[in-house]
Image: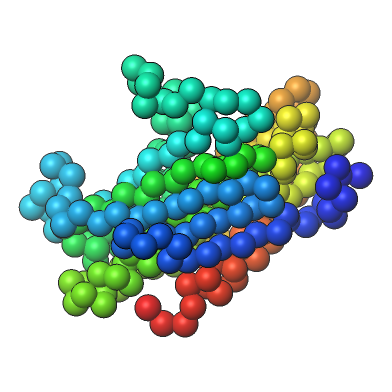
Amino acid sequence: MRPSGRALDEMRKVTLQADCSKHAEGSCYVKFGDTHVLCTASVEDRPPPWLRGSGKGWVTAEYGMLPRATNTRNRREAKAISQSGRTQEIQRLIGRSLRAGIDLHALGERQITIDCDVIQADGGTRTASITGGFVALWRACATLKRAGTLATWPIREHVAAISCGVYAGKPVLDLDYAEDSVAGADGNFVLTEGGALVEAQASAEGEPFARDQFDEMIRLAEKGVGELVAIQKAAIGVGV
């Protein structure tokens, strides 16, 4: 039924390559099928101004798509007066999601910025960015630990994200663009390793969808995030 031939509860092939950037404190090259995102983590030894003296650190994110990430060229946002609303929404979502997995007091008064650059888009760029961004964040914390600048390990639990939607009347896991562009409903779900919801975004694209379809999307998201956490752990490796 699905254009890709996948089962309703089957994700695209996902790969996470940690430490792919020479200079960043943490990095991950993530592939959700034909969606490819480079995530890098940069550490600054000072927090944002509003957190100075608080003992807390901060994790934030920036997101962007390269001009030919899609089938037509997008103008670089650096040449525009301001970022698009979509870009601002996505980078705030990435930041909120990653902060859910880290103890900001244990991080100390420093800031980690996760840059998510979409190299190629085929649906699910925000969920790929969150999933790969967590690996980059972990590796940045490992860099700080090796340097002896962390008194306590700050990562509390894994965080990952996956899209779910209603395609041809059926809830499905991990929509690619062919499905997303005609889906009856589209949602993005961010969960912790323990199954707690960090964020749930779901909207009807045409007719309203049923409550049981939403419940099934959450079940699919739990399954998908469980698989993604296992892939994250394999990418990170044993030890820090």
Closer to the camera in the image, 83 or 171: 83
Residue 142: quadrant of the picture:
bottom left
Residue furthest to the right: 1
Left or right position of 148 against 215: left
User: Percent from the top left, x then y, of residue 136?
Assistant: 41, 60
Q: Is residue 144 above or below residue 85?
A: below
* Rendered-image quadrant of the C terminus: bottom left
Q: Is residue 131 above or below residue 186?
A: below
Residue 50: quadrant of the picture:
top left
Residue shown at the point (87%, 50%) measured from the top left? 5
Left or right position of 212 against 39: right
User: Percent from the top left, x then y, of residue 41?
Assistant: 35, 55
Left or right position of 217 against 15: right
Residue furthest to the left: 53
User: Percent from the top left, x then y, of residue 81?
Assistant: 34, 17
Residue 151 seen in this snapshot? no
Count how many numbered circles sit on residues in the image. 0
Residue shown at the point (81%, 37%) measured from the top left? 167
Closer to the camera in the image, 204 or 77: 77
* Rendered-image quadrant of the N terminus: top right
Residue 235 seen in this snapshot? yes
User: Percent from the top left, x then y, of residue 76?
Assistant: 44, 26
